[in-house]
Image (tube, rainbow, N blue to C red):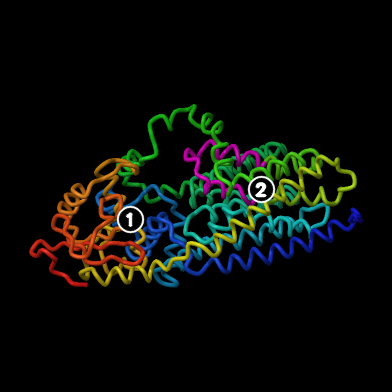
Amino acid sequence: MTTTPAHHWPHLAKRVCTILIILWLVLLAISIPNQRLIGDEAWLGEQAYFLAHDGVMRSELFHGYAMQHERILITHKLFIALGALMTLLFGWGLTPLRLVSFIGGALTVWLLIRELRHESTDDPSLTWRIGLVALLGMPLYFKFINFYRPEVMVAACGVASYVALSRYLKHGRTGTLLASALLAGAAVLVHVNGMIYTAAALVVLLLHRRYAHSALYVITAVVVASLYFVDVFGHWDMLTYQLRQVPSLTPDDFHWSAPFWRVLDEHKRLFRKPEIIFTTLLFITSFVYAWRSRPDLRRSLLAYSIVIVIGLGAVAKAKTTPYAIALLPFFALVIAQATTHWTAHLSRTKRWMTALGIAVWGLFLTHSIASNSLAAVTGKHNAAREHRRVAEALPQGATVLAPMEFIFNEIDRFDVRAVIAARLTLAGHHEAELTMEQINQYANDRNITAYVFNSQQRERFGLADAQLGDRYGSFVVALITDHGTVVLVHSPGSRYGLYTP
């Protein structure tokens, strides 16, 4: 049996990386049309809609809950502003909103390639390819490029901030330091978890004994981040009230020791699901190898990476996996640097380390190919077309209790109130179950004249066996779609309702 000479491994690795990059890009292109819709896109998208049309971030979906119909003070403000800009430029819809994340992803890819081509000491042409394979192969990152959520854009701000910081450390220009600080502050405006980038930059600057510039950096980043409170002036009581209404927050979350306990629980995010587990394993293996073999990275990339991991654990109470997207480009940078160095020094690497490297890369790529392929071709759903069909059964201009997603693209035709808002208002948290009687009382108190329930809500409210013409209080079933959505219209005067779809 013949073996591949060690000096041929980099060439082979480049060919494999090129094939994988093409595969990721093809799958990404396939995934974009009719991508599934997630609830947060509606809540965030509605804020962008009202910012574009009314000049204020607010919500009719949550009308009456925490004063959100007047304005929302706790949100992802720069991200919402970018969504509003896309709405003004291209009109209302999912595609313009999702452009924000897609642009953030494209910017991150460009910055990652640029950074690895300039900072690799082994083989820059291989390093950037490995970095791109790693980043686009991460199922979380691949999936969320398609969604209007802030994680991909906050990661873009973080990478841009790090690249500018890296240039400052190399050339000593104050302008690039200020640019890095400005971008770190902007990351907070995109998502408050973005504060981890300022903390990481501070640690790196202190490790390089740049004490005066450390202070300048923090001041600049804090000044930019403080723009978050521009719309709070004159509304401090509303801010405190809305903070108290956040279902996931408790008084214990503000205790001085809370960040410490959250860090100890961070494994619940990084090892929560396969979509992050194999990425985490590859990062940890790469980090340990890079720490041992690339001491030049210890005070820059490696220190920065470990601080943002700890920082995210400290500031993010919810251990959901999407928050980890803020870390993933830096995982890719570490993986690329470590893997390229390993490939270049394969003949001098211990066999057990080579075996471990092959194993973790094999697990990562096997899962990534399967996961990204499934994400690209399954779960397709044209929500706007489905909602147009539903709208045909509704009186024009009706106040409708519906899933949040119904605002795509019916926000101009109906006054849409979210079912989840009813649950929060009546029961105080997301998990509480409501009866149809409670829903009817909620509707009567708020002049709601129609219901739209998806298949899950239909079962939850005891409508699984509902038929056309069935009456529930003063509401009559007017439509049942092929996807299991049921429409009920207020019609007190007739056994079968006053409206015929």
Amino acid type indicated by mark 1: Arg
Where residue 438 appears, x then y in whole percent? Answer: 20, 47
Find the residue positioned furthest to the front.
465
Mark 2 and mark 1: Cα distance apart in space: 36 Å
**Of residues 164 and 467, which is closer to you in this image?**
467
Q: Magenta residues, as a range?
A: 304-330
Q: Quadrant of residue 465?
A: bottom left
Residue at left 13%, top 63%?
491
Amino acid type indicated by mark 2: Phe
Residue at left 55%, top 57%?
143
Q: Check disc 1 and report the residue beneath it.
A: 58
Where residue 286 appears, x then y in whole percent? Answer: 73, 44
User: Would residue 120 be visible to someone looking at this image?
Assistant: yes
At mark 1, the secondary structure is loop
Exactly how many numbered labels are in the figure? 2
In the figure, is residue 241 to the left or right of 213? left
**Of residues 341 and 486, which is closer to you in this image?**
486
Q: Is residue 316 magenta?
A: yes
Residue at left 10%, top 61%?
492
Where residue 141 appears, x then y in whole percent? Answer: 58, 55
Find the residue positioned furthest to the left.
493
At mark 2, the secondary structure is helix
Where residue 132 appears, x then y in whole percent? Answer: 69, 58
Q: Check disc 2 and report the residue beneath it.
A: 331
**Of residues 463 and 119, which is closer to you in this image?**
463
Q: Quadrant of residue 15?
A: bottom right
Q: Is residue 149 above or below residue 318?
A: below
